[in-house]
Image (cartoon, helix red, strand yellow):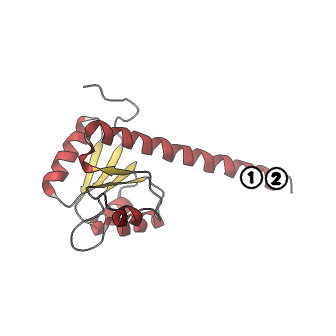
Amino acid sequence: MTVDPDLQDRVLLLVEDDPDMAVLQQRMLQKNGYRVIHASSGEEAVRLAIEHQELDLILMDIDLGPGMRGTDAAQAILESRDVPVTFLSSHTDRATVEKTQGITSYGYILKTSGEAVILASIRMSFRLFESRMNEKEKARQIWTKALQFD
């Protein structure tokens, strides 16, 4: 197995309420060079996202059982920090997918997609987020230069 050096030591918050699924996903992610923090509820995800500023990406399950849904947890996290959130779900119905569309998200991955697709989707989420951050920085620089000429 070859681990992509660009991904080495990236920290992911895996939000998954099913203990067996969480173990499988965590092992797969760690095998591929990621450091993984696990949350089993939406409330725990919000707390951990605030506590762990080193997080590089959040993999958010949508249906987290009783309590806060994944979509609500994602919105709460994004109110306090800018971090890419990628939804990881077993649901393919239109209503569930549409719940994620109003949230700044970097993808929607089916849990049954398989390791190669999940890893490619994570890499794409990182690239999209980095591109968005670069665009924000360019806009900030343009705005700063414009203010200097006033």
Residue 84 position within the rendered picture, expressed as x and y whole percent measured from the top left:
44, 52
The amino acid pointed to by label 2 is Gln
Q: Can residue 55 be seen in the rendering of this structure?
A: no
Residue density around tag 1, few if under 14, some if 14–19, many if 20 or more, within 10 Å: few
* 148 sits left or right of 15 in the view: right
Identify the residue under disc 2. Answer: 148
Place of residue 133 in the rendered image (x, y in percent of width and height, measured from the top left): 56, 48
Which residue is under mark 1?
144
Disc 1 secondary structure class: helix
- Mark 2–mark 1 Cα distance, whole angstroms, equals 6 Å
Vertical side of 127 occupied by 102: above or below = below
Dividing the picture into quarters, in which one does residue 114 lie?
top left
**Amino acid at dot 1:** Thr
Q: Is 123 or 96 nearer to us in this picture?
A: 96
Query: Circles 2 and 1: CB distance less than 8 Å?
Result: yes
Up the image or down, 47 lies above or below 30; here it is below
